[in-house]
Every structure is written in C-alpha cells, then in structure tokens.
Amino acid sequence: MEESLFKKMMSRLLLDEEILQSRFNEKDYWITAKDACEYLNVSKAMLYAYRRANMLSYCKIGEAYRYKRADVYKLKAQMDQELIESGNVLKCDMVIHTEEEAIKAFEKDLPEVHFRDDSTI
C-alpha cells in the first residue's frame, strides 16, 4: 500500500471517530438487560414486554440484548410520574421527573423507594 493512500485512510478513520464521538455522549451508551431490570425495578419478563411494545430501543448481540440507556432513563421517568399520579407512592427519597434527574440517579447509589402493595390490604 502506498504511503499516501495509507495516510488518507488514517485521516478518514480519525475523522470518522471524531464525528462519532461528537454525536454520542454518555447517555447514548447501551446497557445490559440485568442493569436495565435493576434500574427500572422490573423482571426480565417485564423488560421483554417493554421491548415487544417498542418502548425501549435495543440491539441483540449474539444471545444478549442491550438497551439504549437514554430510553431506559425516559421510561423510568415515565414510570415514576405514573406512580405519583396514581397515588401508589408511600415513601420515596427521590422521585425521577426528568431524564437529567435519571442520569444523575443512575450514576450514584439510588435511595430505597417504597411502594404501596394493595395485595396485602
């Protein structure tokens, strides 16, 4: 391979890398099903239902599914808002209202959230 061609290819690759890095940020990374389940406090079956309902962007790599972190944040914010509106929250140290709040909460230890369980009444 000629040196000039090699240099052109390398500069193109570096440019592509810069473009990709500028288009994606921390919240655009993909997370595992286990992490998504823990964050959303749902079972794998429920996560599957969200996936089937097109509520979460995902990709399949081999046998493993990965979920777009930004979509998981948005879904968590929606779920928390629905809980607040329904009155099913008894005690909560932190309620997620926005995607930004979800990002902050995801990056640190989440406080325990308690929900009213109507089945025990």
Image (tube, grey):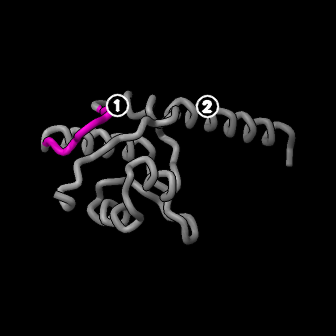
Q: Is residue 50 above or below residue 107?
A: below
Q: Find disc 2 in the rendering and name its residue.
A: 18
In the rendered image, residue 93 lying in the magenta stretch gets the answer: yes
Q: Which residues are magenta?
A: 87-96
> Which residue is most to the front?
121
| Residue type, numbered disc 2 | Glu
Give percent across and percent down for residue 61. Answer: 56, 64
For residue 94, which numbered disc appears in the image?
Answer: 1
Of circles 1 and 2, the one toward us is 1
Element type where label 2 sits in the image = helix
Residues at discs 1 and 2 in contact (Cβ within 8 Å): no
Residue occupying image coordinates x 78% and y 41%: 5
Nearest the eye: 113 or 24: 113
Give percent across and percent down for residue 26. Answer: 52, 34
Q: Quarter-wise, where is residue 105 in the image?
A: top left
Nearest the eye: 32 or 18: 32
